[in-house]
Image (tube, helix red, strand yellow):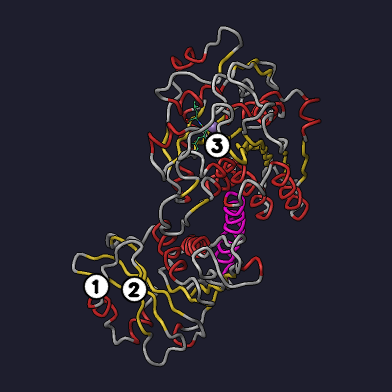
Amino acid sequence: MTALTLSTSAASGLRADAIVVGVAKGAQGPVVAPGAEAVDKAYDGRLADVLQTLGASGAEGEVTKLPAPSGFKAPVVVAVGLGALPEKDEAHTAESLRRAAGAAARALAGSKKAAFALPLADPADAGAVGEGALLGAYSFDAYKENGSAKGGKAAGNGKAPLAEIVLLGAKPRDKAYKAAVERAVAVTEELNRARDLINTPPNDLTPEAFAAVAQAAAKEHGIKVQVLDEKALAKGGYGGILGVGAGSAAAPRLVKLSYTSSKAKKHLALVGKGITYDSGGISLKPAGHNETMKCDMSGAAAVFAAVVAAARLGLEVNVTGWLALAENMPSGSATRPGDVLRMYSGKTVEVLNTDAEGRLVLADALWTASEEKPDAIVDVATLTGAMVLALGNRTFGVMANDDAFRTAIVEAAEEVGEDSWPMPLPAHLRKGMDSPTADIANMGERMGGGLVAGLFLQEFVGEGITWAHLDIAGPAFNEQGPFGYTPKGGTGSAVRTLVRLAELTAAGDLG
Ligand code: BES
Ligand code: MN
Ligand code: ZN
């Protein structure tokens, strides 16, 4: 795990492998960002010229390495692009700092220690740089012959992540700076753990294995945990979760994580889709559509990470996390298209397509979560390919039964640097799910498939409870190259938004 410390040392005297500075894209070329004044001075004030000569522009994510000025203990200066120069009197946004720090940390994989001299206007900026750097310094190498998990040096990209990050320009003894950095450490450690879970191959991360990880973490952080195994699920009448898990040799689980604060006035429930592998079931996915389906538990991973982060931060709110874990496989015992399931709520569902399984496990979890009458429920799921078609690979869709709540979530996401967009729940799409046999079918019109799925979920939310649904099918898993602080593979999408929602609920500003 990468360490993060604050230092008031001068950049020149710091024993490190590199000093990271920011460079913005000005109209006339690169502009050295605040925080790097001393470094620039050591280049006789010519750092911007040197960078321009080297072809740097300050564009977002651009990384330029140059020899450090004489007298510096660190051998290398890494100039990282922050993107467009802010208007006069304005500072770089937290997200541009996060991305730049992430890009620099990725470029420094294989190095031990780097000092970041990026522009810090306030404690929140220090948190953003810390977050970006810690998220950029991630690699998943547990399955590499010489990976760090086996005591070796090789990582996913052949290099171990940057081991030590020093933030320059933050005030180590200032409470607000300390709190911002502690928050960054807690949130990113849990987010990176969510990434690990997503990246873990599905032959190892079964529902049972995921539940065991949750149990261990809950114990460590004073969170109450309850695991319903297949017997308890049968006894409780959880037809949705059992129906989805019926085809797999690895039995399903429903995990409840309860973080409580003695000062809590509000209760937030988080529900995560945890399909450890989605083959589609009897409605089998064709090759080309199933290679990344280990990511189908990203919602549950995000919920898990957010509950643990809330506990580590001691937020003054009760947060209950529900992980609906099952593996969707075809077999002689699998649910067939045409089967009717009796759900935990008592409603019956005709399964027309076994690949629309996420809504089935979520329906049971949403109804259970509703029984506690929380102030709000937010579910997170890699639910539909339709949402990916609509919003692309970096934006999640937000649906809700309350417009103000939906807006608050989109704004919270924006605040923490996650891209999201409000989506409607058009009532007319409900009748496409009418079933001649059961109360509802698990499929409706193909057009607007993401919204149809949202409408299905809404049927399983308890009367009068504020609810929102985040469809993270696009951003949960990055199949393209890494960018900013986002690696290839599991991204940890929605974790930061959920943590922010818990904070806002604690402050009485939500739900
Ligand atoms: N897990 C998939 C959705 C998905 C697609 C996640 C792409 C990540 C990337 C989900 O279970 C699914 O298969 N949905 C179907 C629903 C359809 C059968 C109504 C879909 O979107 O095609
Ligand atoms: Mn599916
Ligand atoms: Zn799925």
The residue closer to the viewer here, 78 or 277, is 277
Q: Point out the tag, 1 or 3, that comes first from the N-terminus.
A: 1
Q: Which residue is mark 2?
A: 64
The magenta segment: 174-198
- Residue 6: numbered disc: none
Is 157 magenta? The answer is no
Residue 419 falls in image quadrant: top left
Q: Tell me residue 241's x, y (percent).
A: 68, 29
Mark 2 residue crowding within 10 angstroms, few (<14) / some (14–19) / many (20+):
many
Q: Tell me residue 385's x, y (percent).
A: 45, 34
Which secondary structure lies at badge 1?
loop
The quadrant of the rendered image in which ligand 3 is seen is top right
Q: Which residue is mark 1?
A: 55
Which secondary structure lies at badge 3?
strand
Separation of residues labelled 1 and 2 (CA atoms): 9 Å
Q: Which residue is mark 3?
A: 381
Residue 318 falls in image quadrant: top right
Q: Amino acid at mark 3?
A: Ala
Q: Is residue 500 left or right of residue 425?
A: right
Q: Is residue 39 left or right of residue 369?
A: left
**Label 1 with label 2: CB-CB less than 8 Å:** yes
Distance from mark 2 CB to nearest ligand 1 atom below 8 Å: no
User: Quadrant location of the C terminus?
Assistant: top right
Mark 1 residue crowding within 10 angstroms, few (<14) / some (14–19) / many (20+):
few
Which secondary structure lies at badge 2?
strand
Q: Point out the tag, 3 or 2, that comes first from the N-terminus.
A: 2
